[in-house]
Amino acid sequence: MLEKLYELLDEFNDEIISIRRHLHQNPELSFEEVETAKYIANYHRELGHDVKTGVGGNGVLAFLKGDKPGPTVALRADFDALPLQEETNVPFKSSVDGVMHACGHDGHTATLLGLAKALNRLKDDLAGTVVFVHQHAEELPPGGAKAMIEDGCLEGVDVIFATHLQANVPVGKIQYRSGAIQAAPDRFDIKIQGKGGHGAQPHETRDSIVIGGQLIGNLQQIVSRRLNPLDLAVVSVCSFEAKNPYNIIADTAKLTGTVRTFKENVRQAIEKEIEQVVKGTCLVSGADYSYEYTRGYPPTVNHQEETEFVAELAKSVPGVASVEECEPIMGGEDFAYYLQHVKGTIFYTGAENPNWEQSYPHHHPKFDIDEKALLIAAKVLGTATINYLNGTK
Ligand SMILES: [Zn+2]
Ligand SMILES: [Zn+2]
């Protein structure tokens, strides 16, 4: 059956690539993916799958019932794009100003649609059900996953699998990790309320820029001096805003940034420590402050048995040159929510073309993927699905 799956996927490879290019050319921002959702729903309807639209927002579910009884496998692909102006020279470059598929979600969706078509051809022999979870809004908290789950997308699901294309990993390589693979991405907003005044009379003021400068320095001590060095964490101030004419001392300053953690106790500790540092720094300088900490997605924690199951199978999939365990990364991913409800795993599919002079990171205006990765991703996901349904598991 796997041989047949690989043959079908090889046959559909050109179509998978053309779907990816179509989506790439027509990107839509998170929570605005109306046309993309329609496209996906139509594709599944033409295959004869039951389709549910408007799941938790723009989410789409499609169901493929095998002819034999068995478990239910969910496969998830996200389909939103980013607010970026594309700077690549590909012929299927984004046709929408300021919007670009720069994370590979176009590829995830094309992979899943191609795989849906192939699995559909095998349904006589499939034991169980495949739920295709096409998720909107991965890039923008609160994200689409949580709302889709609340809308029932995991009902009856036994296991969930997904992959993320990785533009910095050579094509042919599959990466996996049991346990935490991606961090919890949180956000903080700090406003310093000093006292503005004449640039020539600093003694009459409480200079918000000077206070903000100290604050940035002091915040660096949270990770370096407050946390156990064995705990992974990032605290980054990513914006410092205090715009004024050249001769006016700033009345207020705003700092925003991100915190990345893997453990709940570390997450809570940092939230508190930031407030302590802000409070102390402002107190010394006679300024007031406001502080807001907003939680993003939970950390993404893969289940061990399901991760090893996929990793082991991936080794014999055609096109896969190597399967290796990877380090966790500090980026966030709302696939985390599915894993809080059902068992499963997300693995990485290498998508870097070894002949490119330079590859660009995800979320970069020149981001691109090697399209060979799509077929490999489809084969690995398909292999895991068939093995899970037909009882090797
Ligand atoms: Zn992304
Ligand atoms: Zn992504």
Image: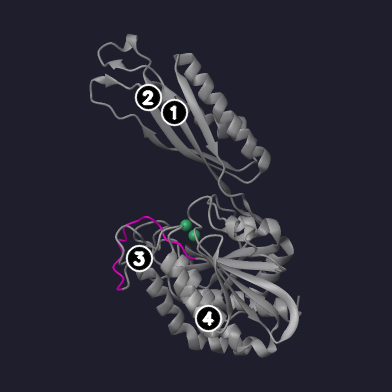
Q: Kindly report the distance in space between the C-alpha atoms of the residues bearing marks 2 and 4.
A: 55 Å
> Cα distance, mark 4 to mark 3?
41 Å
Question: Which marked residue is nearer to the observer: mark 2 or mark 3?
Answer: 2
Q: Nearer the viewer, residue 284 or 47?
A: 47
Q: Quadrant of the N terminus?
A: bottom right
Residues at discs 1 and 2 in contact (Cβ within 8 Å): yes
Residue marked by disc 3: 357
Magenta segment boundaries in residue numbering: 79-91
Quarter the C terminus occupies: bottom right
Q: Residue at x 53, y 25 (%)?
A: 277
The residue carrying mark 4 is 45
- Residue type at mark 1 is Lys
Judged by depth in the image, the label closer to the viewer, 2 or 4, is: 4
Tell me if residue 81 is in the magenta stretch.
yes
Ligand 1 within 8 Å of the CB at mark 2: no
Confirm or reject: label 3 Cβ below 8 Å from ligand 1: no
For mark 1, give the secondary structure: strand
Q: Please say whether residue 240 is one of the residues in the magenta stretch.
A: no
Q: How is this picture coloured?
A: one colour
Marks 2 and 3 sit apart, C-alpha to C-alpha, by: 45 Å
Instruction: Give the class, few, some or many, for how many residues have Cα within 10 Å of label 1's Cα (few <14, many ≥20).
Output: many
**Front one among 360 and 19:** 19
Cβ atoms at labels 2 and 4 below 8 Å apart: no
* Residue 340 visible, this angle: yes
Residue 54 relative to residue 178: left or right: left
First in residue order: circle 2 vs circle 4: 4
